[in-house]
Image (cartoon, rainbow, N blue to C red):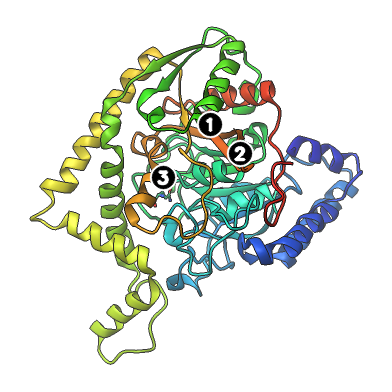
Amino acid sequence: MIRALHHQLVNKELSAVELTDKYLQGIHTQDSVLHAYITVTEKKAKTAARKVDEKIARGEEIGLLEGIPMSVKDNISTKGITTSCGSAMLRDYQPVYDAHVVEQLKNAGAILLGKTNMDEFGMGSTGESSYYGATKNPYHTDCVPGGSSGGGAVSVAADMAVFGLGSDTGGSVRQPASFCGVVGFKPTYGAVSRFGLIAYASSLDQIGILAKNTEDTAIVFDTVSEFDCRDATHRKRNKIATVSELQKPLTGKKIGVLKELMQGISSELEQLLLASVEVFCGLGAEVVEVSVPELALSLPVYYILACGECASNLARFDGVRYGTRTKNYDTIEEMIVNSRTEGFGFEVKQRIMMGNYFLRSVNYDNYYKKAQEGRAALCDAVKQCFEEVDMLLSPTVHTTAFPFGSLTDAVSRYKTDLCTVLANLCGLPAISIPCGYDEKGLPFGLQLMGNQFCEHTVLNFAYQYEQATGESRKPTVGGDSVGI
Ligand code: GLN
C-alpha cells in the first residue's frame, strides 16, 4: 500500500494534499461513530502535506514514507500536541519534545493525522478504560476494538490512517490488530527506542506498528528502529533491512506450534490455524508441535510484574511533578491525594493498588520475586525452543472481538492476554496477521513469534503467508454488514 501510494505521488497521479484530505475525510465521516482519535491535527497535517507537494513540484526525490498519513497512539510524545495517555490526569499535557519514533517518521516525511484513543495509560484489552470514551470496532460497532491500542488499529482498519504507531506491553498492538483485521507488530525489546513513550511497565513496554500489510510494517519498522542513545535499553546492532528479507523462501525453515496456547480453542479457530499450518507447509516449512509447560505461569507473572512497575512509574503523577493538579485542596497531602483520585480512572487505580501490595516488603518475596523467577523460567524454556525451531505459532487471541461490557470481571479481561504476554515477558518480536473470520464475519489473528532481534525473520514469514493467502478484507462501518 505505501509503495503504491508512493508511486502515485511520484507520478503526480495524486498529490500529498489530496491524499491527506482523503484520510481526513475518512476521519470526518466515520470518527464520530468509531472514536479512534482523541486529537486530530488537521491544520498541521495539511501544512506538512503541502511541503511534500512543493518538493515534488521542484523535481526533488521523495522517500517512501514522504506524504504518507499516519496516526500515533496518545501515549507517544508529540511536541506541542496533547498527549493524554487516554487519561484525565494528562488531559492538558503537551510535551515539549517528540518521541524518537515520531522524530524519525517526521524526518522521513510521514504526515501525522492525529493521536489515537487508548485504554488509560495502556491498561486494558478492550478500549473501555479510556477517559475519552471507548473506540468502536469497525466490523461491528457493538463490539470492542481490543486494546490498549484500539484507536490505532481502528484508524488503520477503517482507512483513517495508512499506518499507526501503538505500544505493546502485554499484547496491546497485536490484540487490537487481531480484533480489527489488520497487521500488528511488536518488535524485540530494545529494537525500537522508547524515548518519549510514556511508561506503563518499563521492562515490558515496546512501541509497535499497525498497518494493512507486512510490507508496510517492514517499511515503518526500518525507519523507526534507527539507533537512539536516549533509551539506555535500545541496542545498537548491525541492522538488517527487514524490507529486503521479505521475499526469502521459507524452504527448510521450522515452525513450532505452541501446544499450550492451542488448548481450549474453538473448533472454528482450530480449523483456521490448521489451514495456516497447511499454508506454511506448502511454502516449504516444516511444522512441529512444541510444548512450554511454564506458559501456565505467564498471566500471573505478567500481571504481578506489570502492576508492580505501573505502581512505581505512575507515582510521579501527583499534580506537583506531573499531572493535572486538583482545584480542591487545603493541604499538600490533600492536593496529592485529590489530584490522583480525580486524575486516574478505576482500572489504573486498581492496578496501582495491586502493584503496591505486591511490592510491600512483607509481600515482595511471595509475589514480585516469585514472578521474576517465573519470568526467568519462561525465558529459559523459550530459549530452548529456538534451538529447535525458527518461529513459534499460536493464535493471537482465543476469540474474535466481543460485545462491550461482556467481560465484567478483571480476571476474565486479563485472560484475553493469554497468548500475547509471552513475547513481552521474553522480549521477543511478534506479529499478528489476519487469518480468517468467524461465522459473524469478525476477524481472527494468527501470531508468529521469533527469536530476539529476528524481526526480519518474523516479517519474512508473515509476508510469505500473506502472499500465499491474499490480503485481508475491508471492514464495513456500522452494524451487521460485515463479511464483505
Ligand atoms: N491488556 C494488557 C494489560 O492490560 C496489555 C496492555 C498493553 O499491552 N499495554 O496490561
Residue type at the position of mark 2 = Glu
Spot occupied by residue 25 in the image (x, y as percentages of width and height): 79, 60
- For this view, does 215 lie left or right of residue 446? right
Which residue in the structure is indicated by mark 2?
439
Tell me the crowding category of disc 2: few under 14, some 14 to 19, or many 20 or more residues within 10 angstroms, Cα based: few
Are the two marked residues, 1 and 2, in contact with CB atoms closer than 8 angstroms?
yes
Which residue in the structure is indicated by mark 3?
416
267 and 93: which one is in front?
267
Q: Is mark 3 within 8 Å of ligand 1?
A: yes
Q: Is residue 151 visible?
A: yes
Q: What count of labels does the image hold? A: 3
Q: Is mark 2 within 8 Å of ligand 1?
A: no
The correct choice, above or below, for 343 with respect to 170 in the image is below
* Sequence-earlier tag: 3 or 2: 3
Q: Measure how far apart labels 3 and 2 are at the Cα level.
A: 20 Å
Q: In the image, which is nearer the foreground, mark 3 or mark 2?
A: 2
For image coordinates 60% across by 53% down, the residue present is 137
Spot occupied by residue 280 in the image (x, y as percentages of width and height): 57, 16
Which residue in the structure is indicated by mark 1?
268
463 and 111: which one is in front?
463
